[in-house]
Amino acid sequence: MDADRLHRNNCITFAMQGILFAIGFVFFDTSGILPRFVKEITGSDVLAGVPQMLRLISTTLFQVLTIGTIRRVRNVRRYLTGFMLTSYLAPAVVVATLLFNATGAVIMAGLFLSLLIMWCSDGCMVISYYTVFSRTVRAGARSTVNGIMQTVGGIGGIGSSLVIKVLLDSDRLSLKMSYALIFLIGLVVLALAALAFSFTKDTPPQTHIVEGATLRGEFSKLKKVLKTNRSFVLILITQVFFTISTMTVPHLLNMFEAELQVGSTDISTFLNFQSVGIMLGGLIPVFCGKKFGNGFLVFFYSAASFLCGLISVVCVAAHLDGFALLALISVCGGITTCSWVAFYNVIIDVSGKNEVPVLMLGNSILSLFLSVATVVGGMIITYIGYMWVFSIALACALFGILLSVWTMLSVKKRKNEELCGNDEV
């Protein structure tokens, strides 16, 4: 397959897979439905943060563990499709516990086992996924493809959240049966996403296989990159403050209920607003990615996190429960969940030749340390209160905005230097 056909084919297949994933992921959103599900089954704010923690730990740990082997994979498409199917079919475990009306403890065990399988498999394929994406989809089209994934997927996600609302508000279904149907529908949509990805093509194996690649060798390369690539280091620091600022997002709906006495029917409505936020978060890369660059996207998501934190602090402090304010909080929280588009593409932007896997490794290690943020947030809520956790998040969001501006300028400077270097050649 020639380069032009390969590019067109993968633009379509990556977009289709991403759209279906965005639609299906709403049914397993670790910032929306899953924290709500865990809180309703267990009543614990700490456990409500565990799904997000499991996602980050499992995904990032397996990214690190597999970094030395993925460079030797000969059929990357088959490798990715296999792990994708394993990941997307894993929720069948928790569906089974709900259908058989198991106890709360068994249901939680099934849920956490499903998530472990789901995100461990995801970790095995993330770096390969973005490596194939970066070498087969041209630079000018990456933000557009990612934006289409998020935009169309976000629109479909609104439909998913409406389905969730109907099922949760139904008087004919028990709580367990409602969630069983929610997870089952999500499983089917995600399986279709894996099917769509199976049509992806890659460059010939001999052009990218690295024989003898080891984890130790990748760490050695990472050490050198951290010394020479200042833009990448700045991105990592920015990501630290951004991640801490978003530790409250999985707890937003529970905060509405506990602090502001919002009813369960309205809670499911605000879940729809989170889906609207996901859609809006996907629109920005489409319209602004090419024009302003991926560095601007980091600033945009940081600003959304700051706005979410600011309004949340005001609402908790003044006990405001206006529908418009809570809807805006939900929308901003949804927007922040799309931040991976910005951070992953910025990492690709500042990477040198064959550096993408190494930089992704550095990003994975950082994410591993930050994975406990949502659980720590739940502990702060349990032992100190919502006001403290939102205040801490707001302070980090402010630093995140300042660093995102620095990141934007650094990425722009690096791009200009690369263009000048090419002109000289």
Image (cartoon, rainbow, N blue to C red):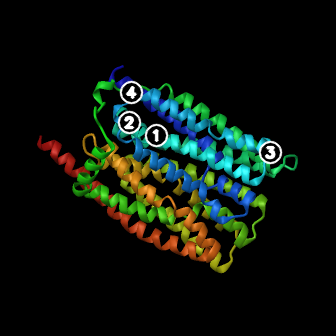
Q: Cα distance, mark 4 to mark 3?
A: 42 Å
* Cβ–Cβ under 8 Å for marks 4 and 2: no
* Cβ–Cβ under 8 Å for marks 1 and 4: no
Question: Is residue 44 something that shows in the picture?
Answer: yes
Determine whether 196 is above or below 62 in the image: above
Residue bearing mark 3: 177
Q: Position of residue 2 (x, y in %)?
A: 33, 21
Q: Amino acid at mark 4?
A: Asp
Q: Give SS at disc 4.
A: loop
Name the residue nearer the viewer: 360 or 320. Answer: 360
Residue bearing mark 4: 202
Mark 4 / mark 3, whichever is N-terminal: 3
Q: Position of residue 96 (x, y in %)?
A: 73, 40
Mark 3 / mark 2, whichever is N-terminal: 2
Foreground disc of the pair 1, 4: 1
Q: Amino acid at mark 3?
A: Met
Q: Give SS at disc 2.
A: helix
Q: How many other residues sit within 10 Å of disc 3, few (<14), some (14-19) or many (≥20)?
A: some
Q: Position of residue 148 (x, y in %)?
A: 50, 40
Q: Cα distance, mark 3 to mark 2?
A: 40 Å
* Cβ–Cβ under 8 Å for marks 1 and 2: yes
Residue found at the far left of this picture: 424
Residue bearing mark 1: 124
Left or right: 42, with 53 as reference point? right
Residue bearing mark 2: 70
Q: Give SS at disc 3.
A: helix
Residue in the picture at 53% in, 54% down: 337
What quarter of the picture does the N terminus occupy? top left
Q: Cα distance, mark 1 to mark 3?
A: 32 Å
Mark 1 / mark 2, whichever is N-terminal: 2
Q: How many other residues sit within 10 Å of disc 1, few (<14), some (14-19) or many (≥20)?
A: many
Q: Cα distance, mark 1 to mark 4?
A: 18 Å
